[in-house]
Amino acid sequence: MNFSKIKDFFSNNKNILNYTFLIVFVLLIVSVVMLKSGFGNFLNTMELKTFDLRQSVIAEKKTVSDDIRIITVDDESYEYVINKYGEWPIPRHVYGEILDYVESQNPAVVGFDLLFVHSMRNNKNSDDRLGAAFKKYDNAFTAINFDDRDFTVRKPVVLPAEISHESESGYSDMPIYKNCRAIIPQILNNTKNIGHINTSKDDDGITRRITLTVGYPVYKYENGNYEQKEVRYYDYMTYNMFKKFANKQFPLLSTAKPVILNWYGETGLEDKKNFKYIPMWKVIESMENGKEKLPADTFKNKVVFVGTSVFSLSDIKSVPTSKYMPGVEIHATLFNNLMDNSFIHQANSATNILIALVLAGIVAFVCFYCSSVAIATGISVVLSACYLIFSTLIMQWANVWIWTVLPILLTIISIIAVYITKYILKSRDFELTYKLATTDGLTDLYNHRFFQDQVRLCIADCRRYDRHFSLIMIDIDFFKKFNDTYGHQAGDAVLRGVAHTLKKCVRSSDIVCRYGGEEMVIILKDTGFDEATAIAEKICKTIASKPFRIAPNTDKQVTISLGVATFPECGVEPQEMIEFADKGLYAAKENGRNQVGKVNIGE
């Protein structure tokens, strides 16, 4: 690698790099302000949408585990059980029989995504049979649900300590619910394989993440009131299933922050990439002798979930890859993520802002470096597209979620900022070029060419609107002798001093120019002959009374001679006015200098 060429490249583009770093610094401030303001909510909403889009793309490349089976109450099964049992919910013992049937095939673990709350008909015998079934199997799990229901609607339940999980360090950011939809005591008292199935939605109503652990207070009932004693932490049902399945503690419990699920595609498709659904009616038929509908090893060594997929049973949710997904499939997705250790890890805000600034900085440098707007814009679009592809690939290969909305937004802002900066720089260059073309470098007065242009413009304007203007021609007395005596540097200092004094003696609308050598001229707009003469006399006295520094600790005084001309009395063409003013100037010199020369109009 030729480092000298790289060094030369950066050295030759030092200004571009400086402007790029300036834009990046401004973008840093802009990004922090946006994220801290209400606009940050909009950015977050848009980022969630891009997450869904990327998940939909990469889901086509993923395959679910063949070890997961879902027994579902689908539309056919719902109609089947209504006809068979005459009610919904169906009698609880049916689920106990389903559990016995599945367990007969030696499954790895079984989980019921159903809330066995109080019986609609208080069928205690049916509930007892279900509780007994759960008691028999240590690999069978069921669910509870926490909420914040008011105590006047539902009294909080004191849950058995056996189903709680005590945190080692405590979770300050963990959701804590104050109430619980308790399941029937026949299950609570017969098994500790119980976990919550609370799912959370983002602000747009889509489920993308799940909190594995939540808090629920331990209540003590005294004198008709519930008193909160402490908070315990309850595991997610599916997580408990996985611990049993894997026979190990998964490290995700080190945080109470929700895990972001990695989704496996649109639900309900007959494809090997999707979860295997088994209608409940087939399971019930297979339990009855002579009506075998399923192979005898359907559930052998499998992870089995039992739940509903019927719209009318209200367990349908929107997820990134599907508008309608049964809750039971969300739990299966969580289990599959646990098996693969494939949860999505979101980069923190600092990392995302850094990535956005790097992308925006590269684009800004390209736009500064390229003189062609079309080429610079094309490269910027290609870089942005490559970043979008990269953000999708890194989510697919490394399960990392990096932002796309903020980087693209900052990229657009950086492009706009670059061209605004370029416009300002070009305007400044134009102004500098114009100044160099119209001003005298020594005195910073307008030059002779600018003076001639302005005189012509003033004459044209006065002719059109019947106005007048005046000229004052000025010459420094004995300037050649001054240069010979004190040197040209002292002469230059006097020229600069006189020029500065002249500009201070006139209005901002008047124009002071260097005519040539030691001669200067002033254009006084909308000024008659008498007024111009008075101004000239004032200038003459001011210059004569002012010492000019020509060297350290050395001041010298000079005098000037002046001549005045007015349009149209003294001439109607530029040359005529200049000649008249020159006559006054020469008259002042002939009469002893340091005065305004008097010339009668018409001579």
Image: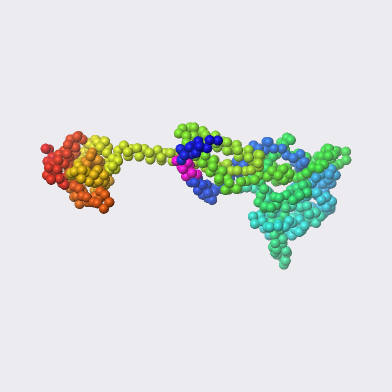
Q: Is residue 374 magenta?
A: no
Measuring 24% from the left and 51% from the top, which residue is drawn there? 554
Provide residue 443's location: percent of width, then percent of height.
Answer: 27, 43
Residue at figure coordinates x 54%, y 48% from the top left? 35
Residue 315 appears at what percent x and percent y? 70, 46
Boundaries of the magenta span: 15-24
Tell whether 135 sits left or right of 432. right
Quick one: 82 or 590, which is closer to the camera?
Answer: 590
Report which quarter residue 283 is drawn in. top right
Give residue 342's position: percent from left, percent from top: 69, 43
* In the image: residue 319, left or right of residue 32: right
* Magenta part, dominant SS: helix
Left or right position of 166 against 504: right
- Where, quadrant-wise, is the C terminus in this rendering? top left
Which one is nearer the viewer's eye here, 481 or 133?
481
Q: Is residue 162 visible?
A: yes
**Between 419 and 81, which is closer to the camera in this rendering?**
419
